[in-house]
Image (cartoon, rainbow, N blue to C red):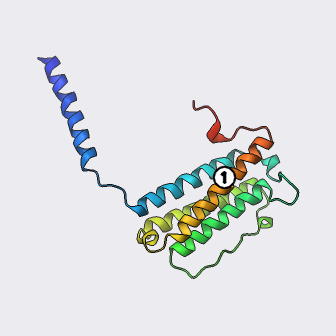
Amino acid sequence: MLKITGYCAVFLALAASIMQAQTKQPTTPAETIAAYFKGGNDQLLVMAKDFPEDKYQFRLKPEMRSFGDVIVHVASGNVYAAKAGRGEKVKWDELDPKNYKTKADIVALLERSIQDANATLKTSPEGPKKNLEPWMGVMEHSAEHYGLLVAYYRANGIVPPSSRPKK
């Protein structure tokens, strides 16, 4: 009898979870944008924290941005998206990498820019519905720089975090 009761409990729990999954509302376009925006920024933040501080000034070529400069540039995009997402009249204002001298400064800047943009997405879910451009444009921009940062990793003989074996 105890065995049958156990099977019934497992069956009921499984049935309840299936029913809950079937009644879950599909995500909205705004939620989808927020998830992708967060996911891309999370990957960039991991890279910013992971890359060795002594290599933050590394450039693939002398005329290119350093690793740290690229992170500041990506943060500039997040600042733009957050302002535009709040409906502010905004143009792209490039943050000056010279104002962020250490890895800690640059990581903190990126974290603040991500938090601000994510907060804008949460408090103004209609924002992406009304105007997709800042979010889509900045996501594309960040993805391009993600690829560039992978090249910085590889040029230094370092495996990028997302390519490392999962533990």
Residue reaching furthest to the bottom: 89
From the viewer's perspective, tell me whether residue 155 is left or right of residue 134. right
Q: For the point 59% across and 64% down, which residue is it?
A: 138
The quarter of the picture where residue 14 lies is top left
Q: Secondary structure at mark 1?
A: helix
Residue on which the image places disc 1? 146
User: How many marks overall?
Assistant: 1
Residue 13 rendering spot, x and y as whole percentages:
22, 34
The quarter of the picture where residue 142 lies is bottom right
Residue 133 rendering spot, x and y as whole percentages:
54, 71
Is 18 rendered above or below residue 70? Answer: above
Instruction: Name the one closer to the observer, 148 or 68.
Output: 148
Q: For the point 58% across and 32% down, which residue is it?
A: 166
Residue 22 rendering spot, x and y as whole percentages:
25, 46
Instruction: Name the one closer to the observer, 96 or 134.
Output: 134
Mark 1 Cα-neighbour bin, 10 Å: few <14, some 14–19, many ≥20: many
Q: For the point 47% across and 60% down, which residue is it?
A: 33
Is 165 rendered above or below residue 92? Answer: above
Badge 1 amino acid: Tyr
Residue 56 rendering spot, x and y as whole percentages:
79, 51
Q: For the point 58% across and 60% down, which residue is it?
A: 139
Quadrant where the image shows the N terminus: top left
Residue reaching furthest to the left: 1
Is 63 rendered above or below residue 83? Answer: above
Quadrant where the image shows the C terminus: top right
